Image (spheres, rainbow, N blue to C red):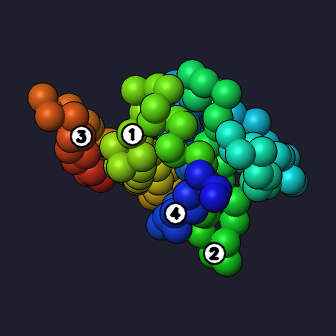
Amino acid sequence: MSHFVSIRTELREKQHLLNALSDLGLAYQEGDRISLTSDMNQQETAEIVASTDCDYEIGFRRLSDRFEMIADWFNIERLTPLKRRTFLEQLTQRYSYSLVRDQAREQNLIVEEERQENGDIILVLSERG
């Protein structure tokens, strides 16, 4: 039985996904068909593979117009502090942050941010004077 879990995400733009991974402090590699291996020696491929603090990595591959996340979460959760749900929430937050900042910059808007104690980020966009 495979330990690989595939999760469809709402992440669509590769550069913002890469920015989010960097923001989370994860090293990654890019390629056409990078191999991921589970502890049962099963293989999957991805175009972006992020390192974890163990031998199991988190992969992302394009599925139609968005990315799918694939990983051996059983072993990642067993061997690292990463938890699938929390990781996806943090990744989505950092992805959204990158996307909004980029779109604001394209529209020549000023971006101010306020970080909340709970980890939320409030972005205030305003026009340049």
Looking at marks 4 and 2 on the same chain, the residue that comes earlier in the sequence is marked by 4
Which one is in front, 116 or 92? 92
Looking at marks 3 and 4 on the same chain, the residue that comes earlier in the sequence is marked by 4
Looking at marks 1 and 2 on the same chain, the residue that comes earlier in the sequence is marked by 2
* Residue at image point 83% right, 46% down: 34
Looking at marks 4 and 1 on the same chain, the residue that comes earlier in the sequence is marked by 4
The three-letter code of the residue at mark 3 reads: Ile
Residue for badge 2: 65
- Disc 4 crowd, CA 10 A, few/some/many (<14, 14-19, 20+): some
Q: Secondary structure at mark 4?
A: strand
Q: Position of residue 92 (x, y in %)?
A: 41, 51
Q: Position of residue 29 (x, y in %)?
A: 76, 36
Q: How many marks?
A: 4
Residue for badge 3: 121
Q: Position of residue 72 (x, y in %)?
A: 59, 46
Which one is in front, 51 or 95? 51
Nearer the camera: disc 3 or disc 1: 1
Looking at marks 3 and 1 on the same chain, the residue that comes earlier in the sequence is marked by 1
Label 3, label 1: how far apart the Cα atoms are: 21 Å
Checking the image for residue 17, the label placed there is none
Label 4, label 1: how far apart the Cα atoms are: 14 Å
Q: Going by the image, does 44 lie left or right of 59?
A: right
Looking at marks 2 and 3 on the same chain, the residue that comes earlier in the sequence is marked by 2
Nearer the camera: disc 1 or disc 2: 1
The three-letter code of the residue at mark 1 reads: Lys
Q: In this view, which residue lies farthest toward the left? A: 117
Residue for badge 1: 83
The three-letter code of the residue at mark 2 reads: Asp
Residue for badge 4: 7
Nearer the camera: disc 3 or disc 4: 4
